[in-house]
Amino acid sequence: MNQKKKPKSSSAKHPKKVKKRQVLSRGLVLESAIQLADEFGLEELSMRNLASRLGVEAMSLYNHVKNKDEVLDGIVDLVISKISLPKIGGDWKKEMKKRAKSAREILILHPWVTLLVVSRMNVGESMLTYFDATLGCLHSAGFSLQAADHIINTIDSHIYGFILQELNFPIDPKEYAKKAEGFLPFLKSSPYPHLTNLTKEVISGKYNGLHDFEFGLNLILNGLDQK
């Protein structure tokens, strides 16, 4: 189901300091960074704001992380660690579905993370484990390692592309029919008969207009059966 989710906006320039000073650790720093990005957006994730949230001086953070890049790498890897791994030796198609659905469920909770996954070199332990387990699942099913790599790239392109569209689609799914109705007069006088008829189906409720994540995933997986 196409559901638009965006980080909460903040009227405050900087997040509130916590009242009680905490004993810092790398894990605490990264968890706090995830919470900060979830609440205020990735643009508000700075070392100063992170230190403010933890109630410490910014320099204290550098005892646990080298810089902001290490924070970004760390929070991506921490989020990836929550995705269910496919079982090597299991039913490969079921395992790929489980993996894809889990990835979407986890990544959609953190609207900032998908762009980091596709735009950075992510070589943390969790990411490497995630990719290796997926390679192993497909290879044990009879696919060559090269074919498995292509399959993973195709499935992940579907996952990440679908999520980015969900998060950034300009129309609320609940408003599809209303928006379609407002657009219909233009279409009736246009040379687009198929689009006009599809719009009428949305208005009538015959079609909800929502893009189906599993529809695309099944196209990919079922297509592999024919190879």
Image (spheres, rainbow, N blue to C red):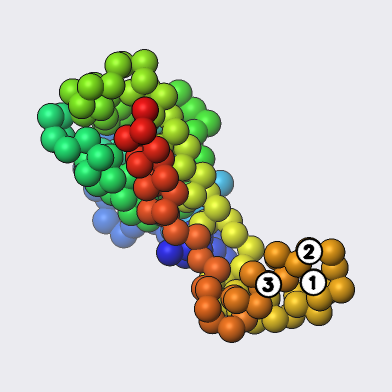
Q: Classify residue 71 as left or right of residue 164.
A: left
Residue type pointed to by label 3: Asn
Q: Secondary structure at mark 3?
A: helix
Answer few, some or many: residues within 10 Å of disc 1's Cα (few below 14, many 20 plus, some between 14 and 19). Answer: some
Q: 10 Å neighbourhood of mark 3: few (<14), some, or many (≥20)?
A: some
Q: Secondary structure at mark 2?
A: loop
Kindly identify which residue carries mark 2: 192
- Give the residue number, with chain letter if any, for mark 3: 197
Q: Are marks 1 and 2 in contact (CB under 8 Å)?
A: yes
Image quarter of residue 171: bottom right
| Residue closest to the eye, 149 or 16 | 149
Distance of mark 2 from mark 3, alpha carbons? 9 Å
Could you tell me the amino acid type at mark 1? Leu
Q: Is residue 45 above or below residue 199?
A: above
How far is disc 1 from disc 2 in space, using C-alphas? 7 Å
Q: Earlier in the sequence, mark 3 or mark 1?
A: 1
Q: Residue furthest right?
A: 189
The residue at the point 51 percent across, 57 percent down is 166
Quadrant in which the N terminus is drawn: bottom left
Q: Earlier in the sequence, mark 1 or mark 2?
A: 1
Front disc: 1 or 2: 2
Q: Label 1 belongs to which residue? A: 187
Position in image of residue 203 (x %, y %): 62, 81
What kind of element bears circle 1?
helix
